[in-house]
Structure formats: C-alpha cells, structure tokens
Amino acid sequence: MQRVSPKKLVLLVAVLIAAVVAVQWFRGGGRSSAKTPAPQATVPVKVTNARHGDLDLTLKVIGRAEAYSTVTVQARVSGQLQQLLFTPGGHVREGQTIIRIDPSLLQAQLDQSLGNLAKDEAQLQNAQTVIKRYQPLLGKGYVAQSDYDTYKANEGVYAASVKADKAAVELARTQLSYAEIKAPFESIAGAPLIYPGAQVTENSTSIVVLNQIRPIHVTFSIPETGLAGIKASMVRGSVPVTISIPGTKQPPMQAELDFINNAVDPATSTIQLKARYGNDADQLTPGQFVEVVLPTTRLTNVVTVPVVALQNSPLGSFVFVLNEDNTVTQRIVTAGPSSGNQIVIEQGLAGSERVVVDGQLLLVDGAHVRIVTDNS
C-alpha cells in the first residue's frame, strides 16, 4: 500500500475544508449563515382605566315577591250571586264591574221607598195649601186657633216624613248599587270562592281574592349590621334595588327601596325591607323567590378596577399595567372590598393607570401587547 506524504495530506484536508465552505456559501446564496433574532411577538389584550372615586358596597340577599295590596272581596248586601264578570287569573281594571248580585229585592225596596216619598210629599203639599188658605181667615175669626195649630202641626209631621222618606230612598239606592261589585284597583283575580247561584251574606261571604301586582313589592331581610349603611344611602336620595330571577336569562330589574320595618327581629337579628317595582310586564308573581342586591356603605375617594383585572401569584395579587411603549408591567397590589364587577385597590395603583382585563394568561412582565376592542 502506497503511503501518502504529509504535505499531500495537509493539501487534501485544505481542499476538503474549502469545498465545505463553498457549499455553505452557495446554499446561503452567497450571504453569511449567521441568523438574526426574530422580532418579539405582541400579545392581543383588552385594557380599561383604573377609576378614582366613590364606590357603593352592595349586599346580596334572597327575597320574595308579594302583592302590593290584597283584597278579599265580600258582598255588602245579601242576595243570590248572579254573575261573575271576571276571568280567573286574569287582569281586572280599576272600577270594572266584576260581580253582580241579584238586584230584584233591592230594586223593590227602592221602589217602595220612592212610593212612600211620593205619598208624603203629596200630604205635605196638601197641608201647606190648607195653611195658606186658613191663615187669612184666622185673623178674621173665621177659623179657630186650635184648628189652625192642628193644621200647622200636620204640616210639620208631613215635612219630617218627607225627610225620612228621602233618606230611605237614598239608602235603598245605595243598597241597590252594592249589587254590582267593582274592582277597587287594577289587579289579578284569583279563583272564585263561590259560584253563581250561591247565596251570599253581607260582610260575611268571601267571593274572590284580588292581588295588586302593578306595582309589586319585593320583601327581604338584611342583617342589622347593614342597617346604618342603608339609612345613610336613603339620606342621599332614593336607594336603587336590583332584582334578578334565579335560573333565568331575564335581565335584572331595577326597583326602589320603599319600606324599612320599625323594629329588628331579635330572634334573627335581621330587619325587613321592601322594594317597589313597577312590574308593567308582569315579570314578577306574588310568592316568587328572587335575588336582591342593594347598596350599603359608600366608600369615598378609592381606586377601583374590574374584578377580572386582578390576578394571583405566590407573591400576592397583581395587575398588568400598560406602559406608554405598549409593554406591560406586573404590579403587585393590595385588594380591598368589592362591589358588583369592581374591586377596590388599596395599594399599588394611583387611579390613572390602564390595566389589562383580558389576555393575561399569555403575558409576562415586560411583554409587548396590542390593544384590541370588542369590535376588532
């Protein structure tokens, strides 16, 4: 085997190195093969401003809807029930005739009273005519004084009878009007308690229950510790109350605090309140359970951010603050009480910062971000 001299070996290695460099040169298009770092990716986020101002703390409790007023309708006269002029479970208007009692006997009593009135008015008129006729004759001695006094007394008796008859007519007419019962307010009628043909007794027989639900009350109780905050809110004006129906997609309803009971229940240390709601679309039904949210204590001059902006780490709670160069800084904060979707930041923010509320999972301290909106 022929040996290769050292010079030839060095020359061969140099040729191989040159060939490798040439191949790399042509593969790189004649450019250097050194790679430049890729630009850092930006993270899409949503931001909002931290707010500096007042915040009303809220209290959430369970309540129950109840009729604004309830009336059990009874007859004011006795008689046979003739007609029910309402639809059970349906609306009735204020002043609408809903019940009719047989008016025959009442009409007869009115007619009798009118007859007595006519008779006594005729007798009174006759007595007055006699007095007119005999008064000139009394002075001439043609009529005895005793007879004249009798005629005068008869006139007074008939006048009194006429007054009594007029009162009897008015009473009979009023009794007849009671044969038609009208709704005292706009309401919903319940199921009839008796039906046509039944005999009703005045001020005794219940016929139907009417519930006024426009407006409607929502009754709930709060701990006595929250009473001071409620009274402070009432001093500032009307207290808004938010009502929601659990398990439905119906939007919350806005009511107004209408009543605070005059005593705390010592057994439960709670006090009863009522909110007034218009209920124009019949969203609430008496007896229905609802969720109630109402403001209590007002915190003044505090910094707040949306609850979704607050994140947690082993070092504590933090938020991502947006910088002028569209980078974010992870800032440790001290969180305080919350109300609705807002939470108080007791330390860490001045109230003028913009904080990230969506996209935090992809962020780290110093990350570049791109602000997006709901319309983006």
Image (tube, rainbow, N blue to C red):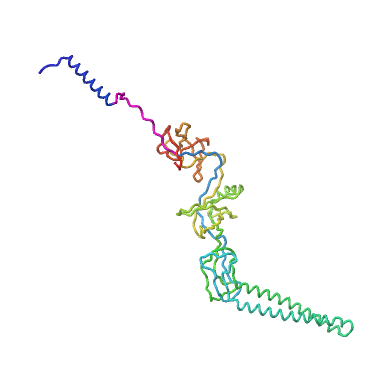
Magenta part of the chain: 28-45
**Residue drawn at (57%, 63%) of the image:** 186
Q: Is residue 137 above or below residue 95?
A: below
Residue sitting at the far left: 1
The quadrant in which residue 153 appears is bottom right
Give percent across and percent down for residue 136. Answer: 87, 81
Drawn side of residue 139 relative to residue 346, left or right: right
Q: Is residue 360 above or below residue 25?
A: below
> Magenta: predominant secondary structure element?
loop
Percent across and percent down for residue 309 are 46, 40
Q: Is residue 286 above or below residue 12?
A: below
The structure residue drawn at horizontal position 54% and vertical position 43%, both measured from the top left corner, is: 55
Residue situated in front as seen by the camera: 228 or 277: 277
Q: Horizontally, is 336 left or right of 41 in the view?
A: right
Q: Is residue 91 visible?
A: yes
Please check the rendered image and state whether residue 189 is part of the magenta-colored stretch, yes or no: no
Tell me if residue 136 comes above or below residue 25 in the rendering.
Answer: below
Q: Answer yes or no: is residue 310 visible.
A: no
Q: Which image quarter holds the N terminus? A: top left
Q: Nearer the viewer, residue 127 or 59?
A: 127
Residue 224 horizontal/vertical position (percent) = 55, 50
Left or right: 63, with 143 as reference point:
left
For the C terminus, the image quarter is top left
- Residue 222 spot, x, y in % from top left: 53, 52
Q: Residue 30: within the magenta?
A: yes
At x 56%, y 62%, the residue is 212
Image quadrant where residue 326 sits? top left
